[in-house]
Image: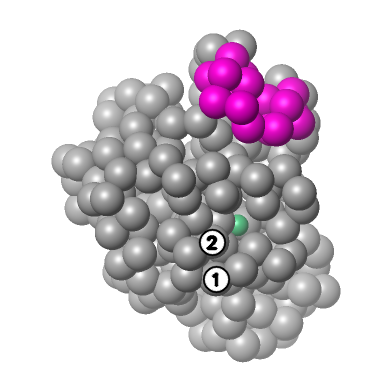
Amino acid sequence: MRAVLSHVRRKKFDAVVCLGDFVGYCAEPNQVVDAMRTFKAKKFYIRGNHDRVAVGLGEGSGFNPAAKIAAEWTQKHLSAPNRRFLEKLPLGPLERDDFLLCHGSPSDEDEYVFHEGHASRIFDSTDASIVLYGHTHLPVIFSVDQNGRVRGSAVNGDALVRLERNRRYLINPGSVGQPRDRNPRSSFAIVDSSKMTAQFFRVPYNIAKTQAAILKAGLPAVLANRLKWGT
Ligand SMILES: [Fe+2]
């Protein structure tokens, strides 16, 4: 996240958006929340399912064993101000400027949107022109034309995608802390609704150091190992 933030600081943007899951898998949740809380910018933040479970606002019933252990570990290690910050994060969907922000989908923060059929149902449920979502950890763009025809494509690596005014979009910027598209570099995007562009960035970071911190904290080794492969 530090690598991404130093990259972001050199870019032009109006607001920083985090679509949830600030914490939940890695060994430095307080450093992450401190940095995101104090980042100097207009900020639009919503919570994710891991934030919810890490502050005890819900059960991690759908969590795999490693995610469950990490959520319990995070709950024990969060500072009081950071716990309060996570507790107060709004649950999406949140309408901000030209965007609808959600973690999983507009109707369910735990829903994974992977394929066009699924995206089509979401387009039917909202008239937002650009929905930004997360949760799957996969950078992708789905769009729908005026006749309801949906197309989707994974975004591989750095890419500039031009958006069309007569289409609506579901955009996932990918994951900063745990990319899962077999590209281990951190992923983020800048979406410009006036220029109608979505620019995706991949940022290298010190994976070995992050893995060492995860192992030293006693978190499950799988959470460290997967970072190397981006899975
Ligand atoms: Fe999530």
Residue placed most toward the observer, 152 or 218: 218
Element type where label 2 sits in the image: helix
Can residue 38 be seen at all in this image of the molecule?
yes
Query: Which image quadrant is residue 180 in?
Result: top right
State the quadrant of the C terminus. Answer: top right
Q: State whether residue 44 is above or below residue 210.
A: below
Q: Quadrant of ligand 1?
A: bottom right
Q: Estimate how packed mark 1 is, as few (under 14), some (14 to 19) or many (20 or more) residues with alpha carbons within 10 Å.
A: few
In the image as oriented, which residue stretches furthest toward the front?
A: 76
The residue identified by callout 1 is 58
**Quadrant of the image containing the N terminus:** top left
Image x and y of residue 198, in percent: 50, 48
Could you say where residue 184 lies in the image, as x and y percent from the top left? 67, 25
Q: CA distance from mark 1 to mark 2?
A: 5 Å
Q: Is residue 137 left or right of residue 85?
A: right
Q: Position of residue 159 (x, y in %)?
A: 59, 35
| Mark 2, residue position | 53
Span highlighted in magenta in the image: 210-227
| Viewer-nearest residue: 206 or 131 | 206
**Residue 74 % position (x, y):** 49, 44
